[in-house]
Image: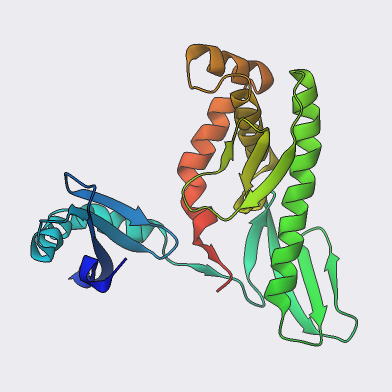
Amino acid sequence: MTKTMIKEHVINYKNQSIHILIRKNKLSRNYKLTFDKKKIQGLVSIPKHISFKNGFEFAQENIEWLSNEVNKLYPLILIENGSSLSIRGKKTKLIFEKGEDRKLNISENKIAIKSDRDNYKKILQQWLRDQILSDSRYYIKLISKQINLNINEIKLSNSFNYWGSCNTKGIIHLNWRLIFAPTSVLKYIIVHEVCHLKEFNHTEKFWELVKKMCPNYKDQIKWLKKNDSYLYRIRFD
């Protein structure tokens, strides 16, 4: 997309600097406002014939909503020595140490990473992705057997918009950030996606199947609605 179709702005509001990206879209017929959780900025889509000034005014009219979305993601939780994270729903402290053996040690409430390079974050992130993939494979194997389905592949995503998805090829995508949620939440997301391979919709029949596989699914939905911002606040860079 050319620069003539995009413009950036910053709105100062209540001691905040809120970044806005205004984008002209040839297919748009109306104004549209969304929020980019990854970049922590507002996104305004406008028809090609609408001026950037009008797009900016539209963002200003909705500044309260944008401010609330920004506030949900601050303060960011930065991965560094001494940070505390919730891993599988349990508070865990991170310790980075210099050492030639390069290893990761796990105790009840602590993860210690030794390395002779400044690559602690990389080691930790790979370990977390390995853990969520291992957990997911275990639960998918159990759940798919209950409804006689074959899952062809599991892939991890880094989406800032969804926790899981699936397709007709039997491939399930799961957000790796679910490692920071209780395992009951991960199980629910897996149940949700596996059930979609039986019912590609959100009809009553679909939810009945979900309830059969995960009787307390509403509790997991409530947890995600209450805590999803925490999962998105965790940043490795």
Residue at point 69% right, 65% down?
125
Q: Is residue 90 visible?
A: yes
Nearest to the observer: residue 1 or residue 204: 1
Task: Establish if 125 lies above or below 145.
Answer: below
Q: Tell me what residue is drawn at x 59 percent, y 70 percent.
A: 236
Residue 104, by quadrant, is: bottom right
Image location of residue 234, percent across then percent down: 55, 63
- Locate the C terminus and report the quarter of the image it occupies: bottom right
Quarter of the picture containing the N terminus is bottom left
Nearer to the camera, 178 or 88: 178
Does residue 237 sit above or below 234 in this rendering? Answer: below
Front in this rendered view, residue 110 or 199: 199
27 left or right of 97 in image: left
Can residue 89 be seen in the rendering of this structure?
no
Q: Position of residue 203 (x, y in %)?
A: 48, 16
- Whether residue 49 sits left or right of residue 136 in the image: it is left
